[in-house]
Every structure is written in structure tokens, then in C-alpha cells.
Image (spheres, rainbow, N blue to C red):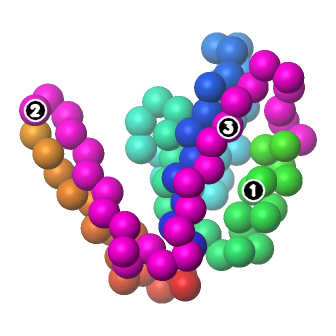
Amino acid sequence: MYVVVFYDVPAKRTRLFHKKLGCYLNWMQNSVFAGDLTAAQYKKLRRELEELMEEEDHLAFVSTENRHNIEVETVSGGTSEFDDSHQGSGVL
């Protein structure tokens, strides 16, 4: 499955989430990570993130089972780029 995770946590706790998410997903920008995970990896990541969470922390998860039907576009400095690196990967 293709997963996008983004978080909003107090500044003193961002390093914890950045480090944990970096073990599973690719860093996109600031507090946004994305990549392919198996169902077991996704479940493990969710459990590990829940153990880190405190009351003021916020997480959002976007996932799709069929990652071939998702389009990822990034825009930086007025230049648009489509990321198709998630399409055709070996993880189903």
C-alpha cells in the first residue's frame, strides 16, 4: 500500500516523529513522509507512533491499496514535478 503520513506536534517532539517515520517512509518535506509499506509494516508503524503520542500531538494518515491510481505532484519555486517512483515498485 502507498501511505502518506503528516504530523503536527510541539517543536520539542518533532525529532521523535521524524526519526520514527524515517525508518519506514521517505521524507517529503518538513512533517510529511510517504512510501510503500506492507500491511504488517503499516500496522507496526501505527503501533509505534501511538506509543510516542501525547495529548497535544496530531497525526494524519492517507493510504491507498492500489498505489498505481494515485498521482503525486510536488511544486517548488514555481516548478511542478510528478513523482511516479511509487508506481511499479515491488511492494504490493
**Relative side of 86 to 39, left or right:** left
Which residue is pictured at 84% across the width and 43% down the height? 50
Q: Which mark is residue 59?
A: 3
| Residue type at tag 3 | Leu
- Between residues 22 and 31, which one lies in front from this camera angle? 31
Mark 1 in CB contact with mark 2 (< 8 angstroms): no
Give whichever of discs 2 and 3 has the lower sequence position.
3
Residue 34, image x, y percentages:
49, 54
Name the outermost residue toward the right: 51
Mark 3 in CB contact with mark 1 (< 8 angstroms): no
Indicate the quadrant containing the C terminus: top left, top right, bottom left or bottom right. Answer: bottom right
Q: Which residue is mark 1?
A: 45
Region of the chain picked out in magenta, as a range: 51-78
Give whichever of discs 3 and 1 has the lower sequence position.
1
Quarter residue 80 falls in:
top left
- Say which element carries label 3: strand
- Say which element carries label 1: helix
Residue 90, image x, y percentages:
48, 85
Q: Residues within 10 Å of mark 3 (few under 14, many from 20)?
A: some
Q: Which residue is mark 2?
A: 78
Residue 21, image x, y percentages:
64, 47
Q: Nearer the viewer, mark 3 or mark 1?
A: 3
**Relative side of 1 to 75, left or right:** right
Which residue is pictured at 84% across the width and 36% down the height? 52
Residue 11, image x, y percentages:
64, 14
| Residue type at tag 2 | Gly
